[in-house]
Image: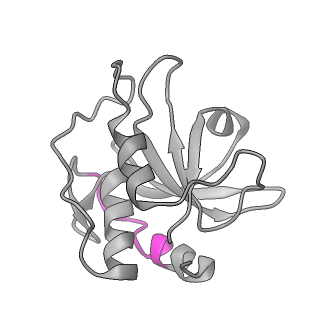
Amino acid sequence: MADAARIVALARDWIGTPYVHQASVQGAGSDCLGLIRGLWRALYGSEPEAAPPYTPDWGEFGATEFLMAGAARHLPAVPRERALSAGQVLLFRMRPGAVAKHLGVLVEDGAEPRFVHAYTHHGVIESPLTMPWRNRIAARFRFP
């Protein structure tokens, strides 16, 4: 299993990277999946599969959970009953009934958890994991 402190440090190194849909280049441009892809490359080298084209719409509805399935292929799931822990990958469902389409990395756990994510119009930022964000967590994963 990858070291949580290293994952947190790597994620925070991406802060300030501009938001660019489907990009994954630290300092130049990234979206939320691009951040996770970049962390994977830093931890393991090449990516395990190419990312397919996707829309930037977080509220997209559909029957297929492509991002959930992709994460499950490469990242071990964290059971819901387990506590939040720094280094976990968070997958969010932004609207009830919509597909889960936003990712972040938990960088602080405890009483005031925080996560790093690529946010449209803001780039890669660190945000508090407030209750509205927590309520949107569809699944949690960890790097192998």
Q: Is 12 inside the magenta-drawn segment?
A: yes
Q: Residue 7 in the image: x percent, y percent?
A: 52, 75
For the rendered model, the colour scheme is one colour
Secondary structure mostly seen in magenta is: loop
Task: Single out the residue that lies furthest toward the right.
Answer: 111
Q: Position of residue 17 (x, y in %)?
A: 32, 64
Quadrant of res 107? bottom right
Q: Is residue 102 above or below residue 44?
A: above
Is 52 placed left or right of 119 in the picture? left
Start-end of magenta stretch: 10-19
Camera-side residue of 64 and 24: 64
Q: In the image, is residue 67 part of the stretch drawn in magenta?
A: no
Tell me if I can see residue 123 in this picture. Answer: no
The residue at 50%/31% (across/down) is 93
Does 89 sit left or right of 42 as displayed?
A: right
Q: On the rendered structure, is 58 left or right of 81?
A: left
Q: Nearer the viewer, residue 61 or 114?
A: 61
Residue lying farthest to the front in this orientation: 73
From this viewpoint, is residue 142 visible? yes
Report the front residue among 71 and 93: 71
Residue 68, image quadrant: top left
Where is residue 96 drawn, in percent x and y? Answer: 53, 18
Identify which residue is drawn at 53% across, 60% down: 76
Residue at 20 percent across and 57 percent down: it is 23
- The quadrant in which the N terminus is found is bottom right
Instruction: Please count the marks in the image.
Output: 0
Picture coordinates of residue 51, whole percent (x, y) = 21, 52
Q: Residue at x 37, y 71 (%)?
A: 40
